[in-house]
Image (cartoon, rainbow, N blue to C red):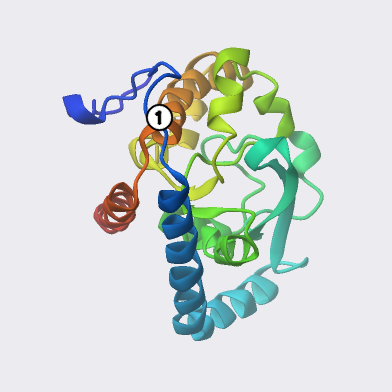
Amino acid sequence: MSQHQPLPPDESPALLPPCCRPPGAGSALLKRLFDLIASGIGLLLLAGPLLLVALWIKLDSPGPVFFRQVRVGRGGMLFRIHKFRTMQVNTEVQGQLTVGADSRVTGAGRFLRKSKLDELPQLLDVLFGDMSLVGPRPEVPKYVAHYPEEVKDIVLSVRPGITDWASIRMIDENEILGRAADPERAYIEQILPEKLGYYLRYAQTHSLLEDIRIIFATLLKIVLR
């Protein structure tokens, strides 16, 4: 089902054993400082475009500008993520996965999702300390319940991020799920385990240099879509 390009050998999402050297306290402090500075500058520089996007959303369809959803953060703590709303209101009850050409997605939402601009409000979550610029993507509780116990604590030991290698390699995830006979089952049995490989490797080996590399790779991937 998956058509993702394999990573180079040094980037493969191998399930590294817990004995691997974890990033030290100094590395964590440097990462948090980088997150604070970058998210603060990003929000200041993007304030104008973000306001225009917010206005577009309000004009395009009834409902709030932001979509808030409970996600699982570091240490298993729950938080409410910020996203620009890209779907009609009160339609999440039909399913939490967005599959193929989902009719719930608004006109503005299709562009925002394609360009990933709907993720930019998560800079607020980074500033507040719930997220990092780079890290495993935060899942909803129902999918975290499917994490194997031997990797759950490791993956949840770091702040979730706006982007990571899984986000880059699986950027067209909803189109892939759209081709599945049972998208929910396909996500749990095929997509999620592949993501967990990337999440686990990042949690065990991340560094500031790796974060910068992932940020630039994300921007390049979006531009070249």
Query: Number of callouts in the render?
Result: 1
Nearer to the camera, 211 or 138: 211
Q: Position of residue 165 (x, y in %)?
A: 36, 39
Q: In this view, does 115 lie to the left or right of 161?
A: left
Q: What is the secondary structure assignment of the residue under circle 1?
A: helix
Name the quadrant containing residue 216.
bottom left
Residue depicted at 61% across the width and 26% down the height: 153
Q: Amino acid under label 1?
A: Tyr
Can you identify the residue that label 1 sits on? 198
Residue at the spot 46% in from the left edge and 31% down from the top edge: 199
**Residue 179 seen from this side:** no
Point 42% across, 31% down: residue: 204
Q: Measured from the top left, where is residue 150 in percent x and y? A: 57, 14
- Could you say where residue 207 lies in the image, as x and y percent from the top left? 34, 46
Residue 216 appears in the figure: yes
Q: Is residue 24 above or below residue 115?
A: above
